[in-house]
Image (cartoon, rainbow, N blue to C red):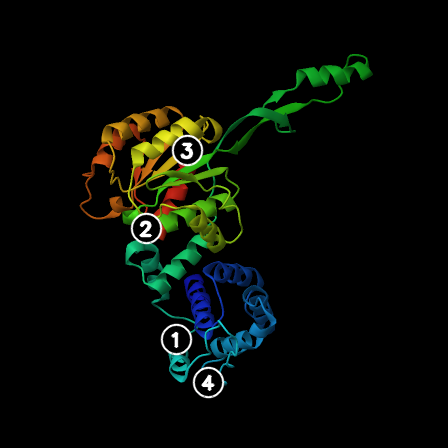
Amino acid sequence: MDGSVFTANVMRFGRILRRAGLDAEPGQTATFLRALTLLGFGRRGDVRAAGRAIFVRRREDRPLYDAAFDLFWRRRGTGGLDGRLPRLRQEGRPPSLSPASEMEAHQAVETVPAVRPDAASEREALRTTDFASLTPEETRDAQAMLEALRPRLPVRRARRSRLDRAGHRPVMRTMLRDSLAAGGEPMRWRWLRRTVRARPIVLVCDISGSMERYSRFMLRFAHALQRSGARVEVFVFGTRLTRITRQLRTRSPDEALRRVAGTVVDWSGGTRIGESLKELNRRWVRRTVRSGAVVLVVSDGWERGDPALLAREMATLRRSCHRLLWIDPLAARPGFEPVTAGLRAALPHVDELVPAASVASLEELAGRLVAL
């Protein structure tokens, strides 16, 4: 089976579970996709057990999962449904599938055969669609794609070297010390090899009203960077600056965003980029933004404060880091020009203006970080 068709089927299975009443998050669907990539799908019982371990959190959810699994993973051509999904008699839980929903789910299954010629084009279209244009179902699928993203990290040469047989220079002091036991004759050559370490990344994200649809995806991208082992510091700003690095240190991106929502008080408000960067430079640069860091400022440039203050603080921030990139989701649109006052004030002090408005553009951004 083609990889894109396989991914489309797994994502459709997650939708069926959500319609049935299970709390199937995009992160769980991505985990199920990775599990099937390693496990394969030749043995039905193994696939059922893997999905049960990932999606079923409570004992009473198991019959519902099994019924949904039989509905989706049955062989084509059997005719009709294998049986109605059991009703949930629990407070605060959505009801089971109605006959109309069952027919919708049945049609959804029938439209995804084992090999579907247009599946690859649908997946590619989703990868390149602007985040602001996604439907709720497409949003969940795009979040699952970001959950499966494992970006390579930018590296730099470390100050320390370590012993290695394929080193670049001999360790004279160690060799001389070892030779004392052999009458001054060196018995074994010792070599040092240069090592590398991940370059720190600092993401400063605009969460004002004009950036709401994009900022949530950028925070998921920061979570993917953190899972890859990068030393990531994350700040958000609207009318004030808030550090959310600790809130993102959890395995589930959905749980991480819930923690962020409980911490940040100026979500979807106004924008004061210059004042927020001033606080970053005065309070956090020495502790979090080291000289070797790559700083990503994510904003559309709508500044309500003084553009001259923004220009001064961008110049200060540029002197404190290795590379400074401005991430503007609107830069990917045809005919884009930097007309906002904030963006025009910031551009002379950035190394590069990068668009990031889709899954594909965030994948390109990850590759750009490695090139740095």
Do callouts 3 and 4 mark residues in contact (Cβ within 8 Å)? Answer: no
Q: Secondary structure at mark 1?
A: helix
Q: Amino acid at mark 3?
A: Val
- Residue drawn 29% across the image and 28% down it: 349
User: In the picture provided, is 226 more to the left or to the right than 334?
Assistant: right
Q: Amino acid at mark 4?
A: Leu
Residue situated in front as seen by the camera: 121 or 286? 286
Which label lies toward us, 2 or 3? 2
Which residue does the numbered mark 3 point to in the structure image?
294
As measured in the structure, the alpha-carbon distance from the residue carrying label 1 to the one carrying label 4 is 13 Å
As measured in the structure, the alpha-carbon distance from the residue carrying label 3 to the one carrying label 4 is 54 Å
Q: Amino acid at mark 1?
A: Ala
Which residue does the numbered mark 1 point to in the structure image?
108
Q: Secondary structure at mark 4?
A: loop
As measured in the structure, the alpha-carbon distance from the residue carrying label 2 to the one carrying label 3 is 24 Å
Which residue does the numbered mark 4 point to in the structure image?
81
Task: Answer above or below: position of 214 versus 323.
Answer: below
Counting from the top left corner in percent of width and height, residue 293 is at 44, 31
Counting from the top left corner in percent of width and height, residue 129 is at 30, 56
Q: Earlier in the sequence, mark 2 or mark 1?
A: 1
Q: Callout 2 environment at 10 Å: few (<14), some (14 to 19), or many (20+)?
A: some
As measured in the structure, the alpha-carbon distance from the residue carrying label 2 to the one carrying label 1 is 31 Å
Q: Earlier in the sequence, mark 3 or mark 4?
A: 4
Q: Callout 3 environment at 10 Å: few (<14), some (14 to 19), or many (20+)?
A: many
Q: Callout 1 environment at 10 Å: few (<14), some (14 to 19), or many (20+)?
A: some
Which label lies toward us, 2 or 1? 2
Residue 134 occupies which quadrant of the picture? bottom left
Which residue does the numbered mark 2 point to in the structure image?
212
- Residue drawn 35% across the image and 63% down it: 136
Q: Amino acid at mark 2?
A: Glu
Q: Earlier in the sequence, mark 2 or mark 4?
A: 4
Q: Callout 4 environment at 10 Å: few (<14), some (14 to 19), or many (20+)?
A: some
